[in-house]
Image: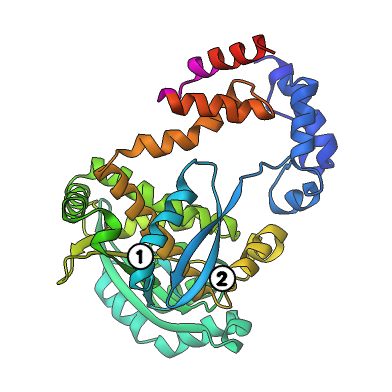
Amino acid sequence: MSDARSSRIEGLHKMTPADRLQAVAAKAGLGNEAIASLAQAAEGRIELADRLVENAISSIAIPIGVATNMIVDGREVLVPMATEESSVIAAVCNAAKRCRPTGGFFTSSSGPVMAAQIQLLGASDPEQVRLKVYERLDEIRTICNETDPLLVKFGGGFRDIEVRVIETAEGPMTIVHIIVDTRDAMGANAVNSMAEALAPRLVEWTGARSLLRILTNLADRRVVRARAVWPLEEIGGEEVRDDMISAYHFADADPYRAATHNKGIMNGVSAVVLATGNDTRAIEAGAHSFVARNGHYGSMSRWEEDADGNLVGILEMPMAVGLIGGATKIHPTAQACLKLLGVETADQLARIIVSIGLAQNFAAMRALATTGIQKGHMALHAQNVALLVGATGDEIDQVASELKALGKVRQDVAEEILARLRAGK
């Protein structure tokens, strides 16, 4: 590699964001247009970006739209969703409208409980190690709660332990879970700090060696459940209902279908998680591992017919989100989105997010069972294609309209339409 393209830039982290951008641009051979685009994208927010991530040079704006028609536990809510994918927000609005006659979405929650794992190795007696840990429960509680007295002050803190012996390729390991009520925080920092404080004492008590000490994103003690009922007349009759249930059975049996089925659910979930400054990767990891925890990857959701013939949807998933800490607390856009939602606790936020996931799933399944996913999706995608080929102003709607009328939402067709429009001027 030549020096000009070397990834080594001495002192990059010490530079201002503006100087950093120039240094990176010089190494990568970026032109003035690319540099200007990166500088403009972060205008007014580059100082915040520099606080949030290392070596910041810009930001990327994800559109935030608002899902309407949502009723969650009897409360009307407007839901901000950050996504670049066409049709996601429209699908939620439509699905939510169709279950309003039955009261919208009803939820329950197991509470804001997280776990951290401490790995103990090298013991010839892992089962005895397991019991030795249980015998120290009171001391463990004291160590954990002293690590985060503010959390305890707000009603959270240590709740319990679970100690497991697992078989691995290198033999048995004793794994200690500390169970913590994190209140309105996502909780990663709190439980990780407790695990770090506790690990040396576990070594002292058991004689084992402590290795990893970190939270698990399989937050199966922090599960939120949402359900909704869609009347037959709102979904298109018995045949559509039955076909949607068959689509669910397909996803639950086949991981190839489940991957896309569940991605549709996460289209909605991740959009609200991102808009509120929460950790999309943690939520996605927890959701997928939760559904596969028994050794089979299937549908995150469940669908059935009730006694009146209506369609019932159910979604249960871990939802470790918070209102305090990280980007959620310091990013003004995330704060504005939380105000828009009108939530006062992390639990309320979690219930809304899971309800959005269920609405998204309904919309995708209904589209697949009727007109197919492409018709609605590509109609909304037409404007994106128009933008892609360089349409501006009124041209965007003109090109998009013709693409939809032709039923060919393709770049080559859009280029021909745009060229014709401009030639006629």
Relative image position of residue 271 (x, y in whole percent): 51, 53
Residue 364, relative to residue 173: is it above or below? above
Question: Can residue 215 be seen?
Answer: no
Q: Nearer the viewer, mark 1 or mark 2?
A: 1
| Magenta residue check for 409 | yes
Q: Amino acid at mark 2?
A: Ser
Q: Is residue 87 left or right of residue 165?
A: right
Disc 1: which residue: 99
Disc 2: which residue: 193
Q: Residue at x 71, y 29 (%)?
A: 8
- Check disc 1 and report its element: helix, strand or loop: loop
Q: CA distance from mark 1 to mark 2?
A: 43 Å
Q: Which residues are magenta?
A: 406-414
Q: Quadrant of the N terminus?
A: top right
Mark positioned earlier in the residue sequence (1 or 2)? 1
The answer to which of 157 and 326 lies nearer the viewer is 326
Q: Quadrant of the C terminus?
A: top right
Q: Are marks 1 and 2 in contact (CB under 8 Å)?
A: no
